[in-house]
Image: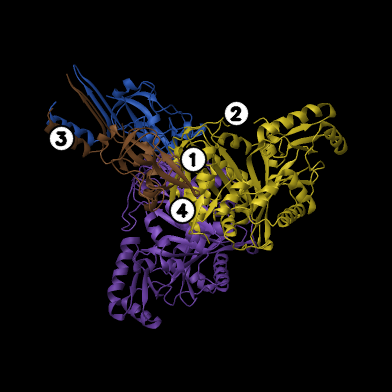
Chain colours: A blue, B brown, C purple, D yellow
Amino acid sequence: MDIKDLKTLIKLVTDTDITEFEMESEDEKIVIKRGRGQEVVHMAAPPAYAASPQPAQAAAPIENAETPAPTVEDKFETITSPIVGTFYRSPSPDSDPYVESGSVVESGDVLCIVEAMKLMNEIEAEFKCRIIEILKENAEPVEFGEAVFRVERL
Amino acid sequence: MDIKDLKTLIKLVTDTDITEFEMESEDEKIVIKRGRGQEVVHMAAPPAYAASPQPAQAAAPIENAETPAPTVEDKFETITSPIVGTFYRSPSPDSDPYVESGSVVESGDVLCIVEAMKLMNEIEAEFKCRIIEILKENAEPVEFGEAVFRVERL
Amino acid sequence: MFHKILIANRGEIALRIIRACKELDIATVAVHSDVDSEALHVKLADESICIGPAPSIASYLNAKAIISAAEVTDAEAIHPGYGFLSENAEFAEICGQCGINFIGPSPENMRLMGDKIRARQTVTEVGVPILAGTTENVKSIDEATKIARDIGYPVIIKATAGGGGRGMKVVHSPASLANAFAAARSEAQAGFGNPDVYIEKYCERPRHVEIQIMGDKHGNVIHLGERDCSIQRRHQKLIEEAPCPVLTEKIRKKMGSYAVAAAKAVKYSSVGTIEFLLDGEGNFYFMEMNTRVQVEHPVTEMITGIDIIKEQIRSAAGLPLRFKQSDIRFRGHSIECRINAEDPFKFTPSPGRIDGYHPPGGLGVRVDSAIYDQYKVLPFYDSLIAKLIVHADTREEAIKRMSRALDEYIIEGIKTTIPFHQRIMKNKEFIEGAVDTGFLERVIL
Amino acid sequence: MFHKILIANRGEIALRIIRACKELDIATVAVHSDVDSEALHVKLADESICIGPAPSIASYLNAKAIISAAEVTDAEAIHPGYGFLSENAEFAEICGQCGINFIGPSPENMRLMGDKIRARQTVTEVGVPILAGTTENVKSIDEATKIARDIGYPVIIKATAGGGGRGMKVVHSPASLANAFAAARSEAQAGFGNPDVYIEKYCERPRHVEIQIMGDKHGNVIHLGERDCSIQRRHQKLIEEAPCPVLTEKIRKKMGSYAVAAAKAVKYSSVGTIEFLLDGEGNFYFMEMNTRVQVEHPVTEMITGIDIIKEQIRSAAGLPLRFKQSDIRFRGHSIECRINAEDPFKFTPSPGRIDGYHPPGGLGVRVDSAIYDQYKVLPFYDSLIAKLIVHADTREEAIKRMSRALDEYIIEGIKTTIPFHQRIMKNKEFIEGAVDTGFLERVIL
């Protein structure tokens, strides 16, 4: 790699939020680290506040709502709640759920209801997909942006 | 990589916020680290307190009492004050200084006086040496452990 | 008493309310926008819930999302803090309709005092002095000309729906009245969606002095003395203190009793502030009432020993006030400096990551702040990142204490207004207490 | 008034003194050992000077180096803080001989009160009650037997030169007297270089209650009420509060007037503390006098509003007290938790680098600490790294406030006693105020 390539490389790296870049060759090893890596300082204030048991459930941040096997997740997508409210799988307590694991839905099909201020908000699929996993229990609270379905786009 | 490339490279790196740059060859290994590496953290509280002008002089810590050319310093040693007090180069105001730059002294020769609580404490050389530099002005305060002479052991 | 309160706010005031709740054994729910998940109010609350994306309008101002969050977490009450929904009567009304206790005054009180003309009429009825002028919308330039001639120049034109200095025009002579009138109306329309303006006598070099009041649902109202908030930049308060350095005991009593009378007249049942202009002769005039807790409430807490937020929560829960007016004793002097993430002299915002943080400590120093080392100050919200409050025996000692506390305060990585405050604390006029609301426009720091 | 003061101490008390000086416009000189150059007192003082290597004996206890440092920096006075040279009469004397003002009482007062037997004699003369027993050295076991029989078991044997609980033996019956007597003498010899011991009645389950006094060089002495320091582990105080939760107004007055009488009798001219044992019947007995400012002085500052360190400096400079006894008013309740770099339950020291630091804030919370993020707590010195002090209207509210402040306090990288304090604040007996100096030995946390 010549100096011009290096220059390009450095620019590439510094224009992003990459914090660590490694590159070996013969033949190939690349490590890219970004964001606030584990070695990081931000240990200062926040981590000492252990989440209290309740909110850990009730208020898990979006990025925690992950599947157990992140390696195969790439092919799946999540559908998140556009509002805060209570998640319902069926239009009324005695009717069938809109979808089950394995259901295939068309764009525009209703997936669930999120109740907010007594209003039942129907959440629709924005594309055709197969439901892989339903991430919330019926009648559980959901936050804004919280993942509620893991789906495979079809 | 020649010196011109190196120069360019150094400029490249120092113009960014890269904190670590490695490069191996035969054939290729590059590591770039930036942002908040572990070495950065300790900047937390202390550095904001700028030393007030007086103590910067009067109370410079030992490691600041360095010579301008650290590369050639290896062959020299420093003699530090064993007590806090006032540094005097001569036994009385109207007598000659014990030593001058360039003086050669034997082990046990008096180098200076440090006055503490009206007591004149003679500071002796612990080995034969040549005085390279006298680091304090006459009648200046010295701290415990503060360098007062730079010498060359003979 | 409540068992669980949702705090519909962020930053230091959210933390302030969480602290009061913890000390009252009340569980807390923090709400936050999706970019605020690392905020301290989220970390310190018992529960937290994300209510929307970064823009306030979609999260902290999103009444529906907040009510919904209260419902899913079974919160019995909502504390709105200051700003955001705190003076939104409609929100308070919706809370009531949903069976959630809004910690603040009644929607009727909020509406009444939120309308400056009606507020002026209300206080006038109990004898509170106001600046000569209209208490009603001035519709035409002819009407304006007549009013200005009657009350005498200089006059000030203000938006009926306005606040915080926006849409105000000072007019010194008849020649400039027409232009100013038109400009004020169009600014009022643009800023508040309502072109109505009123005209009053302009008070030169006034001090901004306000009375903290506190009421309950049993008809009791007391006041906790005054705060002087004359150090303002473009009508934004930067430094507040209590007591006011020039107020005599006689004027304090008079101002206090007017404030209590005005609050009692409307059956005011929460904490609030009645703002006055004080002129150089000791005359004072009602400006407006804030129907919420204020940023600067700590200086009153320091000199009275009363936890205003706790009392506000208690009274919202229907408990009677624990103090009579005669129980209120003032001790010493308190000053608050608002520390903003801004350039200290140009006041341009300076959001970013805090890289090095150490607050001051020791006797008489209080820090109300929701920042911490490596916290990222976001560009979406208010630039207030910390309130540094001191308390001491005398004003002179309080200024010295503030100076040394400011010198100790380390916030690295972003610009803050600490250097601005350091200079004010060494300013001769400020030290002498000889300031008015125009001080910062005149002084060269 | 002084223009420059040298502070012959380190840690939080050095910082406390620097803060007071800054507020009094007095320049400060910090002294430090060579390993302490990163300490906060060094960073915050106007000047600093290295006086010796790490061991205290060669630096912070090195009288010669400290006097020399005062001379080369032209300091007019030396504040000794607590510990180190603060109760060393000889040091105070040398200061005087070198024309440096020692901020503390006269060497004579220090000598008198430092000798427990002479101190007991002195206070007895002004009528202060002491526990029955000798006020003189007990030379033989025969004498000891006779005394113990006269005053009745249980008795306690104490070293004349002792302090902090070292060399004390409680004897419950004649059978164990001889062994205890011999052991106490040899411990006294080993610990203080002086085998002299005295015997007094042992008070069971007493509270430790002490009176803060303040005198000037004009013969004025007042007291600032009491502190309760019953939460002790091996005679080391861990939590202190003011006022004492069980003291009646009548006993407070009596105890205070005795303390003032004792101090006046010896023309005491600085701040000091007179320690009493208080039994379950409201009887109290003089224990000893501390001729310096104490670690726990902040709780008194919180309830009286008086800056004890500033007053101490003023009176050392020859100024008369600014308060009469009748000016002293108590407000609310204050608690201090000593946060040590120790295992919270085994109390083994835990020095090391602090890696993550965030102190609590908000209303009624004071932090006196010289640590900061990435500061390295050294193994050479005292393990006290922070004092967390709260003030509130009532004791109940103060306990809640302390709890929430402890919950907020983040000190990472080393072990601290924060978890210990968190448990105490939730302990039923502590909450009820039903504790004595043996509480920690009995309670299972």
Nearer the observer: mark 2 or 1; the answer is 2
For the residues labelled 2 and 3, the Cα–Cα distance comes to 58 Å
Rendered image: mark on residue C44: 1
Residue B7 shows which numbered tag? 3
Q: Amino acid at mark 1?
A: Leu
Cβ atoms at labels 2 and 3 below 8 Å apart:
no
| 3D distance between C-alphas at marks 1 and 4 | 25 Å
Q: Give the class, few, some or many, for how many residues have Cα within 10 Å of label 3's Cα (few <14, many ≥20).
A: few
Do the residues bearing badges 2 and 4 touch, measured as CB atoms within 8 Å? no
Could you say whether the residue bearing mark 2 is in a helix, strand or loop? loop
Q: CA distance from mark 3 to mark 4?
A: 46 Å
Give the label, 2 or 3, closer to the camera: 3
Residue B56 can be seen in this image: yes
Residue C281: x %, y % from top left:
48, 78
Asked if the residue at tag 4 contacts the one at tag 3, i.e. Cβ–Cβ closer than 8 Å, the answer is: no
The first of marks 1 and 4 along the sequence is 1
Instruction: Tell me the residue that label 2 is attached to.
Output: D346
What's the chain of the residue with tag 4? C
* Residue C405's disc number: 4
Nearer to us of marks 1 and 4 is 4
In the image, residue D316 sits, relative to residue D158, either above or below, namely below
The nearer-to-camera label among 3 and 4 is: 3
* Mark linked to residue B17: none
Kindly indicate whether the residues beneath marks 2 and 4 are on one polypeptide chain: no
Mark 3 or 1: the one toward you = 3
The picture places residue D269, in percent across and down from the top left corner, at 65, 57
